[in-house]
Structure formats: structure tokens, C-alpha cells
Image (spheres, helix red, strand yellow):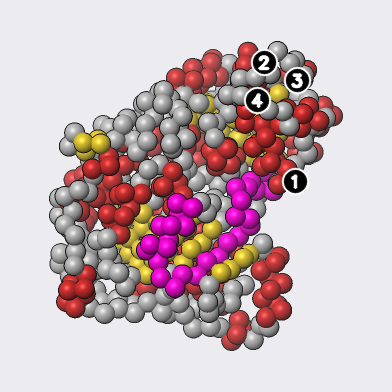
Amino acid sequence: MSAYGYSSNNDGYGYNNGYYGGAYGANDGYGTARYGGDRMGSLGSNLQSINWQHELASLPSFEKNFYQEHPDVANRSRTEIDVFRRQHEMTVHGEDIPKPVTHFHEAGFPKYVLAELQSLGFPGPTAIQSQGWPMALSGRDVVGIAQTGSGKTLSYVLPAIVHINAQPPLQRGDGPIVLILAPTRELAVQIQQECAKFGQSSRIKNTCLYGGAPKGLQIRELERGVEIVIATPGRLIDMLQSKKTNLKRTTYLVLDEADRMLDMGFEPQIRKIVDQIRPDRQTLMWSATWPKSVEKLARDYQKNVIQVRIGSLDLSASRNITQVVELISETEKQTKLYQLLERIEGESGVNKTIIFTGTKRSADNLTQNLRRTGVNALAIHGDKSQSERDWVMAEFKAGRASTLIATDVAARGLDVKDIKYVINYDFPKNIEDYVHRIGRTGRGGAKGTAFTFFTPNNYGQASELYNIMLEAGQVISHRFKEIASTKFHGGKSGGSRRGWGGGSGSGYGGSSSRYQPYGHR
């Protein structure tokens, strides 16, 4: 296994592959990232260092504190605030942290932003938004830690719009005021959609820079001038090196899914980019987890930071997700999958399902087999062209295809809010990917179910999976507890121990009686 959690022979998925890095031309797909014949690590080596002590004197000053505490918020007692934070599993760290807001109007957003929020029918801010908005609007450097699907994007997009509208207009040749870095093209596009939605009333322009797409349109948009750039690190460095844009006007920097960017090996590129931005900027980092690598990055690039965390710092899964482990053999997996999909198909409505496989080849084979049985399944992985991936996702989001088969790399950053089921056909290489996989369901307060096919080849990861399930309050079968408490070497041991009952569902929440229509769990 590589240092980034992927097997060295995982169908060509090397770290910093072309799908993420973004600077390699239209046909790189997910292959090993190269730029001008060099490995990704050399990308940005031609960027000129900036003497900010000298440069700052020639740049305009800027305002970044826009927060005015609403009287209702100011009047809340310390006890009320403590109760609110406990109820929402909220922990804060730092000095002079503003109180959380509980209603949209308390955040102090302009009327046009409030109107857009209300038109979407949201009942109120999510936990991360209630604390994140006052923090970001106050101009402070912020770390926000919360699970995927918790509303992190709007936690920084809405304050970004307020920030932009308070700055001098862009002049010809200026780069963006707001820079948002994201690990994948899918996530970058989703962020762009939110920026466009909430920025249109104040005519804020944006562009999205990512690899796997022609550079021409992206370059033209940069030349016309945009207040917001959303980018994957590789393509942005490419644009900086070719002098298609610069970051001298950037005063609001966001690193979204910082943990995933570092997992994928982007730290050298992130550091090269941040060094191109004035040091008195506002920096906001958002992450689902808080590993040492992200903590160090925050220490290096943030000042007087304040932090909000929703939930535990430990790797954890949402309690809105029912986790079901099927203890079966490798040869039983396809039959078990057909049985599950038949039950899901029999339910009313469109029940969107993502099936995760370990390789691109497995995804294609499984898709073909399912389509032969009448399941409207589509696959997304690195051998698909960008236009194919866009079409597949459009079909899945619209519900015209209710079953998506994906590899880990291809599915990262996908934001489809109404996924009801996740099926781990192949168990992932590491437990972090398991948590990210099942986090595709149970979003925005909805309930979801994640099925995991667990074979003797996976027993070496049983204890980690057991801990995730235990922390999330799941019902765990006695047989799986036994496996988790046994030491296995290399994940291959125990193959002769037939304790799973031939795929009868004994791992299903600890009792075959739980193998009932899903709505009754």
C-alpha cells in the first residue's frame, strides 16, 4: 500500500493522479500526474517567490471584519450558549470566540443573501454554520471540522460574498479576491454552483479551474476578471506559472476538505500556492477530520486561529447511517448483491444507491452484469472521459439511473444529497475511505443505510470497523465481535473458519430477524 492509502497495483491509481492535479491537459484522466514530463512534486518549481514585506506596501489595505452581533445573540447568557453547543456536539477553541447564531437573520447577512436562503426552504443554520458564520464574518482565521454534508460550503461561501462586496473593484490584470482550493473537480464544481447562486444578485463572477478540461475557456474567464476562483491545486499552479492569473489581490483563502488534499499528496502544491498570497489575508480551513498533517498546515499558515468542531475529533460515522456488515465469502458477493438490489428495487420511489468497488475493472464488470439483469446501473471511474463522467452524474442525480457503481477515487467529492443506500461490494484499503464512502448517505439529517460485504480477506481490518460501528451506536453481531477481537495477519487469516452462515445475513445487525424490509429498522 502506498503512503496515501492506495495499493501500488490499484489499476493505475497513483497518488496525485491527473484527475486531481488538474494541470495536465484534457486527456490525463486519472493516470499518474505529470507536468511537462515531471512528477507532480515538481509542479510550481518555476513560481517566483514574493518579498511580501516589500510588496505589501504597494497593495491596497482591505477590511475583513464585518460582523456585528445581533441584539438577540448578545442577550443570550453563557449558560444558554453552553447548552446550545452541547446539544449540537459543538466544541470551540481559541480566544474571543463569537457566540453562535440560531437564526439566519442573526448572522447579519445582506437582504439579498437572506432572501436566497429563505427561498431554499432551509429551516435554519446547521450546527457548523451557526458557529462558522460569526467566526468567518469577524475576519478571523478559522478551522472548521465537521462531517461531509454538514453545510460547510455555505459556512464560507456566504461570508466570502460579504467580504468581496466590501473590497475595491477589480482592475484589469487583477487576480481573484477569494480563492477556494478543493481536492477534486467534482467538489470544485459543486462549490462553484453555490458561489454562482448566492453571488449573482451582486454580480460576483467566478471561474472553476480543474484538470481534464481544455484550458482555453478557463483562461478567457481569468482574463475578463473574476472575484472568486475555485480550483484544484495542479491547474491553479499551471495558470500561475503561465501568468494567466496572480494572487496579489487575494485576501480570503479557503482550503476545503484539507484532510483529503493532504491525503492525496497535495501539501507541496498547497504550500507553493499559499506563499503566493499576501500574509495578512484571512485563511479558513475546513476538514472532516483533524490529523496531525492538517494541524501543522494550520499552524504554519494561520494566525490567532479559532476553531469549531462538530462531533468527535476521532474518525467517526454519522449516527443517521445504519451500518450493516454481511459476513460472506468472496464467491457469495454477487449473489448477495442481487438479493439486496432486488429488495431495494421493490421499495417505493427512487432509491439511489452507490456501489463501491476496489478497481475500475471490477466496476465495469459489475455494471455489465447488473444491466443484463435489468438494473439501470452506470459506472464512474478514471477510464471514463470527462464528458462521460458528467453524463453519468447527470443521469444519477436526476434519478434516471438509480444505481451508481464507483471507485473510491472517482467518487470523492460527489455531492448527491438523496442517496439512500451505500453498498461496499469491495471493502476499502483503509478505514478512512470506509467512513467517507458511507458518508455519501445519511446527509442533511436524512437516514441512510450502508451495507458492507466483509470476507475473510478483510478480517485484518475488522477491529477498526468494529470501533467505527461501536462509536456510532450500531448493533453488532456476536460473530463479528469475535472476528474483531482476533488478531489476523495481513488481512488473510481465518479463511477456513466458516462462521458466517453461508451469507444468511448473520452479520446483519447481530440477528437474522433484522433482515426485514429496510423501512422497519
- The picture quadrant where one finds residue 201 is bottom left
At 52% from the left and 26% from the top, the residue drawn is: 357
Picture coordinates of residue 495, whole percent (x, y): 67, 15
Q: Which residue is mark 3?
A: 500
Of badges 2 and 1, the one in the foreground is 2
Q: Name which of mark 3 and mark 2 comes first in the sequence.
A: 2
**Residue at the spot of label 1:** 473
The Cα atoms of the two marked residues, 4 and 1, are separated by 25 Å
Q: Residues within 10 Å of mark 4 (few under 14, many from 20)?
A: some
Q: What's the CA distance linking mark 2 and mark 1?
A: 28 Å
Q: Amino acid at mark 3?
A: Trp
Residue nearest the observer in this picture, 380 or 428: 428
Q: Position of residue 24 (x, y in %)?
A: 24, 38
Q: Which residue is mark 4?
A: 488
Marks 4, 1: nearer the viewer: 4
The magenta stretch is 292-321
